[in-house]
Image (cartoon, coloured by chain):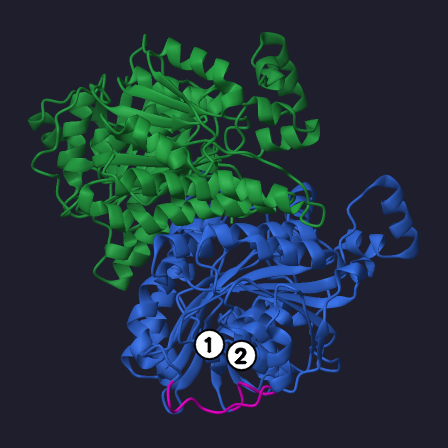
Chain colours: A green, B blue
């Protein structure tokens, strides 16, 4: 659970030594703390031709209380920001030498509809990237390529992925870079997602592409419930499997901090840890083996009266071996617990109407499910299946306003990864844009964003929590 | 261009040294040679419940002249194979110790429609993987998840990706593992793709997922031209940009060997090399700067009379720098040559009807376009845009029977990569399942498969030629 190298190179002596030897120096990532402001500092605004999201962005920036500075590519920003009562100014490239001047870079590429119109992207990031401070944020906004009217526009919007992923790998210093595609008509639904990507909550989420589509009929439902940004899950009931320890306990804790009543599930042998975790959170504990045939009905019965709003499928196991040495039982149990059990539980909760309308399902996949992994044929198959669940069920659940998404953790510092051989562990830790492993809370915060009432437009998606790991498919 | 480590560890002394030091020992990959049989040896057949592709597979295996052995999971294979006049037998797990006994493993997972039905996958690969010889082939066949009738079936089919990618990483020894999704109704269109993945032509293509959908109206066109498997491109005219040297020259050479008349394009300064390359191939040379405004019209005019059947967009440049140090000119020229020029040329060829019905467009993307790369914001943006071009144009071109696909090379041994710093070059070479870089001919053979008249069902796809590089998104 301890990255002693990270601590060492961030000590005065270790820092000097690392510098003199040319060793990598991972940043201590800034993470969300309830006792510190979530948003502060300067945000630089850039834009391509005819930016379509300026109104929504100005309203967002006003609500989070940041101060904007307009790059020359964003000529229309200043008058608009003034209308929104925003503190604003102009970004002067001459001052670009000033390190740490900026907290975030935001580029509205929504109006770009041809590959010949990319000049402003270069101009903006060329001028601003060096002024972005440690643990800064880069967000590029575009239109979902597959919804574009012409191949030229689709191509141009799709090209943004290559830029954003490269910026993430180039920026280092704890900086994240993400791409948000906002569908036409969903401009008013961007706040929860943009807040997440601008916040320290997304410390270990970089190089990701997220789509915000209109919910239900491509527009916010008329009965969209109001919520308090400080307690967005107040009044919600959240089921979390595998909640006794590690990532599951972190998920329970973050959802509770956001106001949810958490119902934690774990196997009977973990009952004491589960009880202790949930007692601290004023939640409820359910001791079930989720893989047992009767478990779905038991869980449904336990939730029946009050229903549930959020289901987090976190429980999972590994039984690593090359397939030639893997027993049939090891193969079968990993697939059953990590994949089939999720299917059975969701079926029971959906058939009984126990998961309420506008509910949220979040499943935990893995980078191994995306890229495959030697020694994990069973685990990778199960986690790739989780991606299939998300992709297949999202269209079906849309009519009820229910979203289903997955997070795919990379190297996270847990008891499990602490047991890995040193060389493998160090490779996992360093082979990403943050040069370090993530924390369970990073996975939990990502899930809390997907579970947010404001994330109604985010469904069918896989979000990696991996510090932009090199590893992929 | 030389991987001296690969040569060294495959020498008698180097091999002993590598063994005693525990160093990786990359296999010398078996590549296609016209003077050696393309297909030989034993192919083991496995299957899940209700395999739907057995007829098509039996017919394929009969046509390539391999001998099949049925694993116990494929009980229906033997009588069927006998009906097809195939040499066939039963795979006996007891003999699994015999190394190199098998040339290929083929699993028909098309009938699996629930995650509870995965046992045969474990049984088959558990029993057979150790018997697969060096440079063996693994192909799993399924149904395209997104076309499945139920979420359970979609999930199960999607899970196969995790398995196949893990098998590729686990198998090593020059073995490739790929997943082919065959749409309902496209069973008769699998031959060109299966031949490619079973052949030494696909030596450096592993961990890939390819879909075979019906062409035009989900069925082979009634006028599908007959072709000779030994000269499938006979009578075809193929345009190859950047053909003077390196990967482009390899593409020209392979397409010519398959029977095409190649028209090579390159910049005027490469005229001598271009002329020499094309003269050898009995092709034609066109000296144009493809980025010049008049180039599309000039190319169209040069091709007008006879038209063209195959267009390979290979020309591309790099101008690497971090974005803060990158000039506007370096940004713009890479995007223009690598991306916008392709758009302009295709527009000219399509608008004039110069690219004929049932034509083929193949564009060269890059792993950098998929994963992003530090120091390559311009290149990665252009290569991600190429992916957008393929995805956006495929649906539009389907009505004319034209396919458009991209190859995304990983680390390929060229003059360009020979100039990389040693540490980066070694990392690029070893961080893949083959522990070595690919050769230009590997990219060329992949393009030849996509350009094949039998590949009508393959469109809108991105195929990596990367030895299953670790790097991805």
Residue found at the very far front of the displayed protein? A294
Query: In the rendered view, would you say B357 is above or below A433?
Result: below
Q: CA distance from mark 1 to mark 2?
A: 9 Å
Q: Earlier in the sequence, mark 1 or mark 2?
A: 2
Badge 2 sits on which subunit? B
Residue topped by disc 1: B187
Answer left or right for B372 relative to B32. Answer: left
Where residue A305 appears, as percent x and y from the top left, is 23, 26
Give the residue drawn at x 50%, y 56%. Answer: B366
Quadrant of the drawing holding the N terminus of chain A: top right
Q: Is residue A2 magenta?
A: no
Give the residue drawn at x 9%, y 26%. Answer: A84
Residue topped by disc 2: B55
Kindly indicate the quadrant of the structure image that contains residue A426: top right
Q: Residues within 10 Å of mark 1 (few under 14, many from 20)?
A: many
Where residue A355 appears, as percent x and y from the top left, is 26, 35
Query: In the rendered view, would you say A460 is above or below B135?
Result: above
């Amino acid at each position: 659970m301890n990255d002693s190298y990270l601590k060492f190179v961030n000590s005065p002596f270790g820092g000097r030594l690392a510098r003199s030897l040319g060793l990598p120096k991972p940043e201590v990532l800034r993470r969300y703390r309830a006792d510190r402001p979530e948003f502060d500092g300067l945000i630089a605004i850039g834009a391509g031709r005819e930016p379509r999201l300026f109104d929504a962005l100005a309203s967002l920036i006003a609500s989070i209380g940041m101060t904007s500075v307009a790059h020359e590519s964003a000529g229309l920003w200043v008058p608009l920001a003034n209308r929104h009562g925003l503190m604003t100014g102009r970004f002067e490239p001459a001052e670009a030498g000033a390190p740490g001047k900026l907290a975030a870079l935001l580029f509205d590429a929504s109006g770009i509809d041809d590959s010949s119109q990319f000049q402003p992207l270069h101009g903006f990031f060329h001028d601003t990237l060096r002024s972005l401070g440690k643990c800064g944020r880069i967000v590029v906004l575009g239109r979902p390529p597959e919804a574009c009217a012409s191949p030229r526009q689709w191509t141009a919007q799709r090209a943004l992925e290559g830029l954003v992923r490269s910026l993430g790998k180039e920026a280092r210093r704890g900086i994240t870079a993400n791409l948000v595609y906002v569908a036409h008509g969903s401009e008013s639904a961007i706040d929860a997602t943009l807040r997440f990507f601008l916040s320290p909550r997304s410390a270990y989420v970089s190089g990701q592409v997220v789509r915000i589509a209109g919910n239900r009929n491509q527009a916010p439902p008329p009965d969209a419930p109001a919520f308090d940004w400080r307690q967005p899950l107040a009044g919600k009931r959240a089921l979390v499997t595998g909640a006794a320890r590690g990532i599951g306990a972190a998920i329970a804790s973050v959802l509770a901090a956001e106001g949810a009543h958490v119902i934690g599930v774990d196997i009977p042998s973990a009952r004491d840890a589960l009880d202790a975790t949930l007692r601290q959170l004023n939640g409820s504990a359910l001791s079930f083996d989720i893989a047992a045939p009767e478990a779905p009905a038991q869980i449904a019965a336990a939730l029946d009266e009050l229903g549930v709003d959020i289901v987090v499928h976190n429980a999972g196991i590994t039984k690593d071996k090359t397939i030639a040495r893997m027993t049939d039982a090891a193969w079968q149990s990993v697939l059953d617990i990590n994949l089939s059990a999720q299917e059975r539980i969701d079926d029971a909760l959906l058939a009984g109407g126990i998961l309420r309308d506008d509910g949220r399902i979040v499943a935990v996949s893995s980078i191994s499910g995306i890229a495959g992994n030697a020694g994990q044929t069973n685990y990778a198959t199960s986690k790739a299946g989780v991606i299939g669940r998300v992709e297949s069920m999202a269209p079906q659940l849309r009519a009820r306003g229910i979203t289903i998404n997955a997070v795919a953790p990379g190297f996270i510092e847990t008891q499990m990864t602490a047991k890995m051989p040193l060389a493998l562990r160090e490779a996992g830790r360093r082979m990403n844009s943050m040069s370090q492993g993530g924390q369970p809370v990073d996975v939990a915060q990502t899930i809390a964003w997907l579970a947010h009432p404001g994330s109604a437009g985010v469904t069918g998606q896989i979000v990696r929590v991996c510090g932009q790991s090199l590893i992929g498919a």
